[in-house]
Image (cartoon, helix red, strand yellow):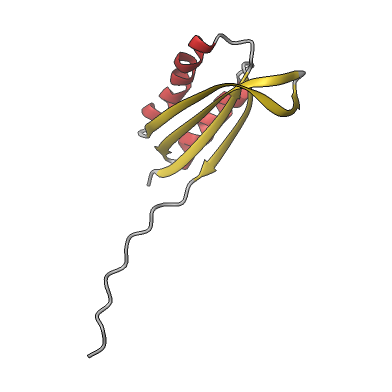
Amino acid sequence: MARHYELMVILDPDLEERTVAPSLDQFLSVVRNGGGAVEKVDVWGRRRLSYEIRKSHEGIYAVIDLHAEPDVVAELDRQLTLNESVIRTKVIRLPEAKKPRAARRPAA
C-alpha cells in the first residue's frame, strides 16, 4: 500500500537554480516508475544553512510531497545520497488522514 511521504532535499548552492527542478524531476522518475505519485514539488530556493555542511554555508532547498511504497522511497533516498550535488536529504512519513467515525446516536 502506498504511503504518504515528505522529502526535503538540500542541494549544492553552486547549481544554477533553473536546473534544480529538471534534476529533481529526473530523480522523481524512480517514484513514478515504482507506481508512486509525486503530489507537489516546492523549490524554496537558496537559503542559509544552520551550520556548515561540506564547507558550504548555503544550500538550495526543495520539499517534495509524494505517495509511494516504502522500498521505492528507500531507493529514491539512496540515489539522492549518492549524488554529489545533494548535500542532505530527509524523508518523513506523514500520518494518514483518519477516517471520521460514524456519528453516535444519542441514548434513548
Q: How many marks?
A: 0
Relative to residue 68, is residue 106 drawn left or right? left
Relative to residue 100, is residue 16 drawn left or right? right
Percent from the top left, x then y, of residue 70? 47, 41
- Residue under the point 32% across and 63% down: 100
Q: Is residue 34 visible?
A: no
Quadrant the C terminus occupies: bottom left
Residue toward you, 18 or 74: 18
Q: Is residue 32 visible?
A: yes
In this picture, is 4 found above or below 38?
below
Percent from the top left, x then y, of residue 50? 72, 31
Residue at the outermost bottom position: 108
In this picture, is 92 found above or below 43?
below
Percent from the top left, x then y, of residue 21? 46, 17
- Residue under the point 44% across and 25% down: 28
Percent from the top left, x then y, of residue 15? 59, 11
- Residue under the point 43% across and 43% down: 4
Q: Quadrant of residue 30?
A: top left
Q: Quadrant of residue 35?
A: top left
Residue toward you, 78 or 55: 55
Relative to residue 82, is residue 2 drawn left or right? left
